Image: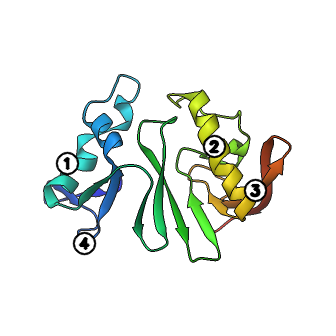
Amino acid sequence: GGGTTEVNGKLVPTFPNAKYYVQRANYETAKNPNAREKASYFAANFEPLIESGSLNFVEGETELLPGISVGVSNGHTVGHQFIKITDGEKTIVYCGDVIPTSSHVRLAWVMGYDLEPLKIIDEKRKLLTEAAQKGWYLFFEHDPYCDLASIEADGSDFKLKEKFRIS
């Protein structure tokens, strides 16, 4: 949601000049979701973007613009992507549903609606290892108390280092 809006009874892109990027695999799932994912995918969220020519498909980790790239996680849903933004010195990762809240930086803490919990643990380990080593900041989409945090290794797991509220 959010990519489309109703104008004069018709759904159109909310931001008509924007380019939208989605993993092709996620789009294929969205067109024909299984029973578990059906409540997450609505044609009204993506068909107006296709009709307007503003939806672009990518496959795998891709740099969209200098300093802006997407990574892929297939444990939550097939083709789920997260966004990495860097200026060369500081990096922020918009985790999406790979790490939805600051509590989920613990490897074993996964969501009940992750399609492949064991896969998401491996994907989180890879992302969190790099984030801890490089001092990245993680943005949590679903956390009501912590918007952004840095992390550090905690034995074979991870923990929050610094927490931030943006609002």
Residue at position x 50%, y 28% in the image:
115
x then y, percent, for residue 123: 59, 41
Q: Earlier in the sequence, mark 1 or mark 3?
A: 1
Indicate the amino acid at tag 2.
Answer: Lys
Q: Residues within 10 Å of mark 3 (few under 14, many from 20)?
A: many
Task: Report whether 1 appears left or right of 77.
Answer: left
x then y, percent, for residue 48: 19, 53
Indicate the amino acid at tag 1.
Answer: Glu
Q: Gap between marks 3 and 2, in whole Å?
A: 12 Å
Q: Which residue is mark 4?
A: 17
Q: Gap between marks 2 and 1, in whole Å?
A: 31 Å
Residue 54 lies in quadrant: bottom left
Q: Nearer the viewer, mark 2 or mark 1?
A: 2
Task: Report whether 8 appears left or right of 157.
Answer: left
Q: Gap between marks 4 and 2, in whole Å?
A: 33 Å
Q: Gap between marks 1 and 4, in whole Å?
A: 16 Å
Task: Report whether 150 appears left or right of 120.
Answer: right
Q: Earlier in the sequence, mark 2 or mark 1?
A: 1
Q: Residues within 10 Å of mark 1 (few under 14, many from 20)?
A: some
Residue 151: give its label. 3
Q: Secondary structure at mark 2?
A: helix
Q: Which residue is mark 1?
A: 47
Do the residues under discs 1 and 3 have CB atoms within 8 angstroms?
A: no
